[in-house]
Image: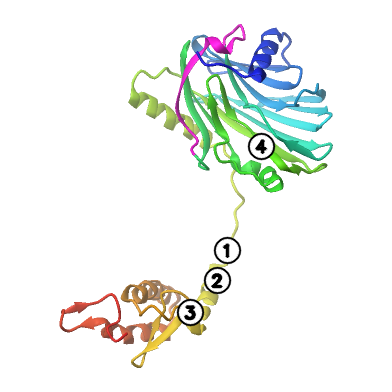
Amino acid sequence: MNGISPWAAAAASELAEAEHALYEHSAGACHFKIYQTIDSVWIAVELPNGGNMAFRPVFAVGDSPEINRISTNDAGVDIWLSSDIGTFEARIKIESGDFPVLRYTTSIKPEKDLYFPFWPRDILVTTRHGKPENTEGQIHASQWGTRSGFIYMSLTRPKSTPILYLQNLTALNDYCQQTETSLGDSVGGNWPELGFALPAANKIPLRAGKKVILNDAFVAFGNNVPETEPELIHGYLDLLASIYLRLPLPETNYQQWPNILESGLKDLVGSPGCWTQVAGHRYFNAYVCDYNTPPEIMVQLAVALPLLDYAEWSKQELEVIKTIKAGLPAFFDKKLGTITRWLPAA
């Protein structure tokens, strides 16, 4: 049995005593209830086969946040709260489909400059009676270093369907830039406390008055309990696909590639640092202003190939291609009967 932190113990006790849900919704075989506790907002999820998980979109650090407004819609609920540390906005969305998907996005507008020396993780696995220490589960895969912030897991007591949690780390860029922190290993934890924790900001605070996203989590719930390793893998791919299709898309940014190509060609041909001269022929340097390394055949050909493509596409006759071709025969070594890497004359 794993131990639990004081934060998890207090949260489990508060959840067990919570009675009046702010919002309820069912999707697939999962039932969702949203509760406000002393310092948090929780999304309690009843899983198939009796499992229970709770996800915390709002944590007000010992304060008692006041709900200013709740707006419900077909897809979920939006909650605005005020506290001593600032105002929170939590957007909670629950979607049905092949697999139920929960998304919660939380932002804060700090009332004052804030340090974040510690932040608890946003997932707590519990029993129906709020006892996380009586649950067991397995983490199949999770974030490593600065790679994608995810956890693929399943309950083993009670045995339940697999769950994929993905934190949209891109949404947290403003937090990291302001506090100069890294999101490496920010998603993980030990059973039954899992999920995302804000990286500790001890030296540079989050500035007052600027709205910043603190959490943007996607959670997909499986339909069947996997019995074999291939079933577990297929389940992961299915859940990942259901989340991937819901990730926010970057705006389309059009590049003027013809202009960029023309500018690049001008710099390539006209910059003295790109060229060296040996035995009456001009050759490309391996690196700009690298006159210590002899000309290399692969450098000449690596530049020639895209230039040939560009000439064919643009219907232009490029003098630089003639220059490259004129210097290639000098790489042939008559004694060896083949071309050499380095220019023999150099």
Q: Amino acid at mark 3?
A: Cys
Q: CA distance from mark 3 to mark 1?
A: 29 Å
Asked if the stretch drawn in magenta spans residue 134, the answer is yes
Q: Nearer the viewer, mark 2 or mark 3?
A: 3
The answer to the question of whether label 1 and label 2 lie on touching residues, with beta carbons closer than 8 A, is yes
Q: Amino acid at mark 4?
A: Ala
The label shown at residue 224 is none
Tell me which residue sits at (55%, 27%) in the image. 189
Residue 218's place in the image compared with 250, above or below, is above
Q: Amino acid at mark 2?
A: Ile
Disc 2 crowd, CA 10 A, few/some/many (<14, 14-19, 20+): few
Asked whether residue 318 is in view, the answer is: no
Q: Which residue is mark 1?
A: 255
Residue 278 placement: quadrant: bottom left
Say which of 294 and 245 sits in front: 294
Q: Which residue is mark 3?
A: 289
Q: CA distance from mark 4 to mark 3?
A: 44 Å
Q: Amino acid at mark 1?
A: Gln
Disc 4 crowd, CA 10 A, few/some/many (<14, 14-19, 20+): some
Residue 168's place in the image compared with 344, above or below, is above
SS at mark 1 in the image: loop
SS at mark 2 in the image: helix
Mark closer to the chain start, 2 or 4? 4
Which region is colored magenta?
127-144
Residue 163's place in the image compared with 206, above or below, is above
Q: Which residue is mark 2?
A: 260
SS at mark 3 in the image: loop
Mark closer to the chain start, 2 or 3? 2
